[in-house]
Image: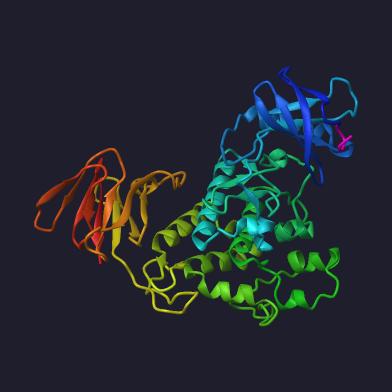
Amino acid sequence: MNGILPEGHTLITDSGDRITVGRLYGAGGQGEVYQAKTPHGDRAVKWYYPAQATEMQRNILEGLIGLRFTDSRFLWPQSVVSDPNALSGGFGYLMDVRPDRFKDLPALFRRDPSVSAVTQRTLVIAALHTVEAYLALHGKGIAYRDINWGNIFFDPVTGDILVCDNDNAVFESEAAGVAGTMDFMAPELVRGDKGVSPGTQTDLHSLAVLLFMLFMNHHPFQGALALKIRCLDEAAQRRLYGTRPVFVYDPANTTNRPVPGEQDTVIATWRTMPKKLQDLFVKTFTVGLTEPVERVRESQWRGALSSVLDSSLICAVCGKFNLSQPGATAPTCWKCARPLDVPPCLTVLTGVGAVRHRTPVRLIRGGRIYGHHLISSPKRHDFTDVVGEVTEHPQHPGRFGLTNRTGTTWTTRRPDNTTQTVPPGKTAALRPGITIEFGGGTEGVVEA
């Protein structure tokens, strides 16, 4: 036996497929996850512990499966699985296998070698993908209810994310057996306020905690007050996260500031965080603590993260990626403290009519223009859809252009209205005042 189920044991899906249990992947609070051989290839099966295999859990599963949610960012339940021989009783569900390239967030927090390739850029992309994933889920009327660092996996190279343990997500206002993980739960849930239940509004608090920890490697309420707690038992956690939560950077309450010498990482990282993101954290973790409707929504996080990413700079001295406040004076490098050079900006204009959407993108060395830049309100940022790439002139070092990586021809227009075509693979000059026509009415203006 390797856990509840023996290797080689046969299970059956609700569609009649017979599957064979393989090795045990791991175990959690609700059950165990195994490799599964199916007629359609390898999958994973989560098998519930007897106490967790309730009728309510089965109903939740059947509702999620019936939704046929096929977003690739989620390991969504595909089929209820039962034991035809009643060897163990209970049930489980089938899902895709998590690819090895996805690592858990605790590996990032403990600086595991498996995530050594991560950069600030990767973290912003991972955060962007995360908020878009939950925006898609909430758009279906589903609350995740247990957003925490154990349910999100990310690729340290690309920033792609994968949301696991989706069997506790439920439609808004429906009951579920899981209320959340205390240090991620909204204060009203921690306190157990009358009439309050997990939903999309409480998800927004949990999402903000997750984003803060992703960037800061630190919990937003664990400052000086947390260090004074001798035993972080349940009662202490309820005070820290529920009855008396204080954001470590609350502008009006400095009692819980991070302590120098003890919590230096969050102090240093907060200083490098663009104000646009700082403001969103402050809003959620101050007014949002008592007024859930004031919590930052996924679309607000998406807009801020996207604009910060497009405004970021690379240090010409040490080569480090630096987050930068959109429209502000360039900061000094977080690594070597040298002044950062500011390259030209391409302001992409999309839409039609008198009011057009403007997306400024800093043209850093090796920077790229993506398909989502050419859409006014993209639902999803795809960093594999490269439209143009900033490249250096082979004969003139220090001179850069935007190389056409599409299959269609662009047109550039100079201030004197003379034009020039830029076929696929060719490069457009990046002199201030030049307009690049990408097609379909979308164009970009090069600005100093």
Q: In this view, does 294 lie above or below 336?
A: above
Residue at the spot 57% in from the left edge and 72% down from the top edge: 269
- What residue span does the magenta drawing correspond to? 1-5
Which of these two is toward me, 14 or 45? 45
Q: Nearer the viewer, residue 392 or 38?
A: 392
Residue 3 is a magenta residue: yes
Percent x, y of residue 414: 14, 56
Scheme by which the image is coloured: rainbow
Choose top left, top right, bottom left or bottom right for residue 174. top right
Residue 136 picture quarter? top right
Side (left or right) of 278 relative to 93: left
Q: Is residue 356 among the parts visible in the rendering?
A: no
Classify the position of the N terminus by image quarter: top right
* Residue drawn 72% across the image and 26% down it: 37
Q: Can residue 195 be found in the magenta stretch?
A: no
Identify which residue is drawn at 13% across, 58% down.
415
Q: Where is residue 150 shown, x and y percent of the image?
A: 71, 52
Side (left or right) of 322 relative to 253: left
Is residue 8 at all visible to an observer of this figure? yes
Q: Which of 233 and 73 is in front in this view?
A: 73
Farthest front residue? Answer: 395
Label the magenta part by its dominant secondary structure: loop
Can you give x and y, in whole percent of width and height, for residue 392 in the image? 28, 59
Instruction: Tell me which residue sits at (18%, 61%) in the image.
Output: 433
Q: In this view, does 364 lie above or below 32?
A: below
